[in-house]
Structure formats: structure tokens, C-alpha cells
Amino acid sequence: MDDATVDNRGWEKGNLREYDQEVKDRVVEIRKKLRKEQSYFFGPQVVRANYRKLYPDEKVPTIYFIAKTVKST
């Protein structure tokens, strides 16, 4: 049997696996901006669309990541 206490994930615990802190901060800022403008739509899909517009050359984060990030802030 494998030891359940061994961590074989390939990245340090507490670090984001796919996205870095900069992407997380961008998502939070986009969401805050939408709320500040009192936008009618401010869900993960809208945040993702705005991210795509603001950073066209960057990889766009998934809706799951955006929802999880917004929920945790």
C-alpha cells in the first residue's frame, strides 16, 4: 500500500497549480470593477469575457477557477 502522508502532487502545497498569483489578482480586480460600476452582469462568464478583452495574448482562466477565486475573496 502507498503511504497516504506522502505528497506526490508535483508542486508545493499552497501554490496554485496552473495559474499564478498575478492571474488571481487580475480576476479579483475585474470582478471589483464590475461591482463598482454596478454592472447587471458580474458572474464568472462575464469576468472571463472581460479578462479575454483586457489580456488577449494571455491564457484565459477557466470558469471554475474564476468562480473559486471570487468566492474565496
Image: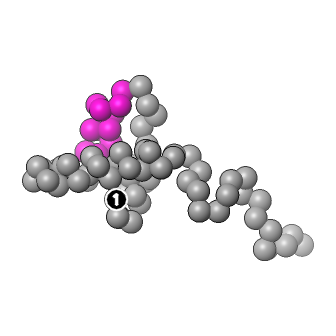
Quick check: is 72 in the magenta stretch? Answer: no
Give coordinates of residue 57: x percent, y percent.
41, 25
Find residue 13 and report its image quarter: bottom right
At horizontal 26% and vertical 51% (from top left) the residue drawn is 31
Badge 1 element: helix
SS assignment for the magenta stretch, majority: helix
- Please provide the residue range marked out in magenta: 46-56
Does residue 2 lie above or below 43 as drawn? below
In the image, is 12 to the left or to the right of 64?
right
- Using the rendered image of the protein, determine whether residue 42 is visible from the camera's viewpoint: no
In the image, is 25 to the left or to the right of 15?
left
Does residue 3 lie above or below 54 as drawn? below
In the image, is 20 to the left or to the right of 35?
right
For this rendering, which residue is in front, 62 or 56? 56
Give coordinates of residue 25: x percent, y percent.
38, 50
Quarter of the picture containing the N terminus is bottom right
**Residue at mark 1:** 70
Quarter of the picture containing the C terminus is bottom left
Circle 1 crowding by C-alpha within 10 Å: few under 14, some 14–19, many from 20 = some
At horizontal 20% and vertical 49% (from top left) the residue drawn is 33
So how many labels did they put on this image? 1
Task: State the residue lying farthest toward the top.
Answer: 57
For this rendering, which residue is in front, 29 or 45? 29
- Using the rendered image of the protein, determine whether residue 69 is visible from the camera's viewpoint: yes
At horizontal 56% and vertical 46% (from top left) the residue drawn is 18
Q: What residue type is labelled 1?
A: Val
Give coordinates of residue 11: x percent, y percent.
68, 53
At horizontal 67% and vertical 58% (from top left) the residue drawn is 12
